[in-house]
Amino acid sequence: MIEFAVPALGGIAAIAAPVLIHIAHRRRFSPMSWGAMRFLQELLARKRRRMSIDNLLLLAVRMLAIACLALALTRPQLSFRAAGLGDLISRQGRTSAIIMIDDSLSTAAPRGAPAFAAMQKLGHAYLETLKTGDEVSIVQLSRLGDPVADPIYDLTAAGEAIDKLSPTAVGSDMPALIDAALDRVGRHLNPDIELVLLSDGRAEGFGVDAKERWERLRARLRGPDNAVAGTRARPHVILLSPRSDQGERGNLAVSALRIDRTLLPPGKPVAVRATISYDGARPIAGALVRLLVNGRDVAEQSLDLAPGEIRELVFIHAFAEPGSYLLEAVVEGARDALAEDDRRALAVEVETRLPVLLIEGKAGRSLDGSLGMLAAALDPLASPGGTSDGRASTDLFAIERAGVSGLTEQALSAARVVVLGDVPALDAGSVSALERFVVGGGGILVVAGPATDPELANRFWARSGDGFLPARLGPARLADKPLHPSTAAIGHPALEAFTSGASDAWKEISVSRWFPLESPPADCERLLALDGGEPLLVDRARGRGRVALLATGLDGAWSDLPYRSAFVPMSRSLIAWLGGNILPPRNLLAGERLSWFPAHASATNAPGIPTPMALAATAEGPDGKPVALAPSAWEGHPALVSGILVQPGAYAVREAGGKHTTWFEVGISPGESRLAPLSPADLQECLHDVQRHAVSEPKQVTELFTSAGNRTYDLWRVLVIASASLLLVETLLTRGLVGRERAAA
Amino acid sequence: MVDDMTSASGSLHGSVHQQVLDRLGKVFVAARQAVESVLAGQHRSVRRGLSVEFAGHRPYQAGDDLRRLDWIVYARSDRYDVRVYEEETRLRATLIVDSSGSMGYSGGGRPSKLDFAKLLAASLGFLMVRQSDSVGLAICDTEVRAHLPPAGTMGHMLTLIDRLERTPAGGETSLGGVLSALAPRLTRRGLVILITDAFDDPEKLVEALRLLRYRKQDVRLFQVIDPLEESFPFQGMIEFLGLEHEPRLRLDGDRVRAYYQQALGAHRGRLAELCHGIGVQLETIRTDEDLALALVRVLTQRSVTAVRQ
């Protein structure tokens, strides 16, 4: 960087002097008639090129000499500073430092020399630049609401606090970390504010695509237009990230683990799919992937992976008994960059019964009624009083049919899925109960029909998008000839029956009458659509639960859906999808809390559930140590709740008496396996109008605040020498030119 | 001086009469080669033959006319000698004046090269007419603009002068081609006096002169040059405007002087060398020279040369 002690750059205009002289000289041509042009033309033919080059060279040398002289008069100084440091930070008074520490899982990479250790060194280097009286807050990504230091004046203690930290399993989220740090600014007293982000510099945590989020953050960091850098309104932003050194190892990870069913019945084989990803540069041969159920090996497969390859392995397994299980996929045999993501687990619940409440607008028995056909599809053996042969129904779906009046709090508390079949209207209490039901994790299927009043449904059920109805209903439409579904969201769990693609039975459905949906919201997923794109079946998340809407009836009046072969599998997979939520959630991310209540208690506020004091259970973490559970509430219901869990792995909650064990899994964000560093372009995208100082070496941290790293050279001396040299060259050139002319003469 | 002459009489004719001719006196125009004119004049012929002035004896040869045998010599010395007489001849001269644009140059208030050439041509013409020689005129630039065959009367001389006076400078220099075109018209042995600045390709010019020599013409080349064209004293930036429609040139006079003089010198050297090679006498006359003195210098030198030969 060049600085000018005397900002008289106008002198540089002097370089135009030779040109102006040249131009002025050109204007003084005296015209003259001349006879002996022949010799001048010969002369020009021989000498013009040489003279032109000589003249141009002479002109350039003269201009350069004057430019150097003019620049030298401004006394410029050339400052050499490490690349990326930006301007020096000048501390005027006492400093308030808010150190943000990214302790996400990726900071544990690479093995042997984790980025976190380098980050700690950078943190110490920064603390050394502070002096007595400066304040320090330390905000940890895994404990955003619980700072380590808040703030403290003891710099030694701050250093020790940094030393005690270690990588956790939380996912990187730099915007959240910076946001939390900005929230701490108000707690500091010193005037100079510095936000220091200690991160491993991975791209994943910055969430470059979250443009709106960064825009809000930038606005907070910039402050008002007239804000002074380093103040509360516009703090200094210092980015301390060690150089990325993943080496050639690459990272092998179990990036996903899933089951292809939403509802797991005992005894039936299910496909467990483990996705293995590898981003290294060298191929991997002979890696082993093992599947464990509740800690016991049940299957294993070996695999070879090419660089950048993503492979899905399928394990078939059947759960013998109902209950809570922990499925784990572990990849072994490759020493990759990050060990923690070589395992991924899934806590599942194997169930024998899924209670479904059918609310019919037109009551009936057996196949009659608005939902008689659906009831038969879900539980063919069900009949009042049991099966025809006298044995009780053992189907997965436990059906309860009722009229509109049967929609009570008690009925809802016993159900996990509610189906509203051709219901004309609901009272406000029922609507409110349904809202709570779905927000709390329940599933609702709304089946429209002849009795459905679209105006009432829109007003009370949809409520301009705030209600449980996924989309507003238009006036019922009658087709000239029956329409068929033309598109289906094959692959969606609700249409699990058609996932294989072998069955196109859904295309045979004929619909003669339906309610067109008025501009469904963007988050409303179309599962089935008629010819012309009109949605027939849509699905939308609402709170922890889901709501599906079928725009035609299931009584056979508006469509032949109940009579088609697709009806039974589609109904069962749809209801299983809506009721597949196991609550409280069993699969958590690091940084969340574990909530538990007995399996026999429902998520809804049913009378008779145990009070917090009555709940008794013990929890055990991945390392075998007990985890404290405190009586609290989950979604308004009594529950035992743990503290923030940062250690990834399996957690087991055992009910007092040891009868039941419920498995929970604290997983890691899949993004933590992606170790690609943040590019300068991405950093610029995130903080493009925020003045920042990026440093990767402890030595540079010191140089950022002192002039030690600011090696300055007096450039004007060089310029004076250059100018003198150029004048000498000019003299030599002129002499050479004259000499040649004389020699020619 | 020439200006003075011109202004004093108001015409070329007058100026030549009053000043130049008076000062020239009886300077003889000598031609190196013999002409076939049989008319008497003051030019000595190198050819020996029957005439009124005795030149000497030579031994008789078979075929000689016996009437030329000098019986007195035979009586005295018993030798057969034949009398030889000097013939007096009439010179047929053609003055060729270059009227190209470059001849229009005049520097330092002096007359232009063309004006000087006209004066020179007229002076030579008068001298020759006064010696009872015939004088013709050709004016040319890129082509022959005027051609008056040689005649020895004063009336013809006046016509010649009138034609000269009406000649402006113009056109481009292409003497080589013009002389080649003119050569067939010169059918009889004679003298060709070419007055030009010779700013032409020396090779082409001399090639044309060689053709004239082949036509048995004694050729004399008077190169008229302005003093400024030799010294090139110009300083500073000059925009040179060509007199023969050449593209204008913007040059620093100080810086190109040496190159110019070098080119001019090379041209003149080459021209002199080529002229010498074909037996053409080259005389350079500057427009600031006294015309009479220049004529004396040139013609005297020529007479001496002729006597030696």
Image (cartoon, grey):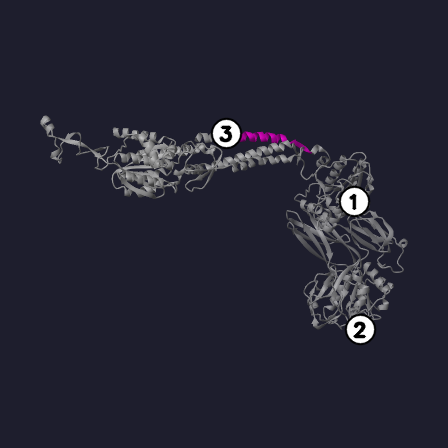
> Circle 2 — which element?
loop
N-terminal of the pair, mark 1 or mark 2, is 1
- The residue to which callout 2 is attached is A368
Q: Are marks 1 and 2 in contact (CB under 8 Å)?
A: no
Of all residues, the one furthest to the front in this rendering is B9
Crowd band around label 2 with a 10 angstrom C-alpha radius: few (<14), some (14–19), many (20+): few
| Residue A113 seen in the figure | no
Residue B244 lies in the magenta-colored region: no
The chain identifier of the residue carrying mark 3 reads A
Mark pair 3, 1: CA separation: 70 Å
- The residue to which callout 1 is attached is A182
| Main secondary structure found in the magenta portion | helix
- The residue to which callout 3 is attached is A735
Of all residues, the one furthest to the top in this rendering is B76
Looking at the rendered structure, the kind of residue marked 1 is Leu
Q: Quadrant of the C terminus of chain A?
A: top left
Residue appearing at x 79%, y 72% in the figure: A367
Q: Nearer the viewer, mark 3 or mark 2?
A: 3
Crowd band around label 3 with a 10 angstrom C-alpha radius: few (<14), some (14–19), many (20+): few
Looking at the rendered structure, the kind of residue marked 2 is Asp
Mark pair 1, 2: CA separation: 63 Å
Residue A711 lies in the magenta-colored region: yes
Q: Give left or right: position of A455 versus B208.
A: right
Crowd band around label 1 with a 10 angstrom C-alpha radius: few (<14), some (14–19), many (20+): some
The chain identifier of the residue carrying mark 1 reads A
> Circle 3 — which element?
helix
Stretch in magenta: A710-733
> Circle 1 — which element?
helix
Q: Quadrant of the N terminus of chain A?
A: top right
Percent x, y of residue B51: 17, 33
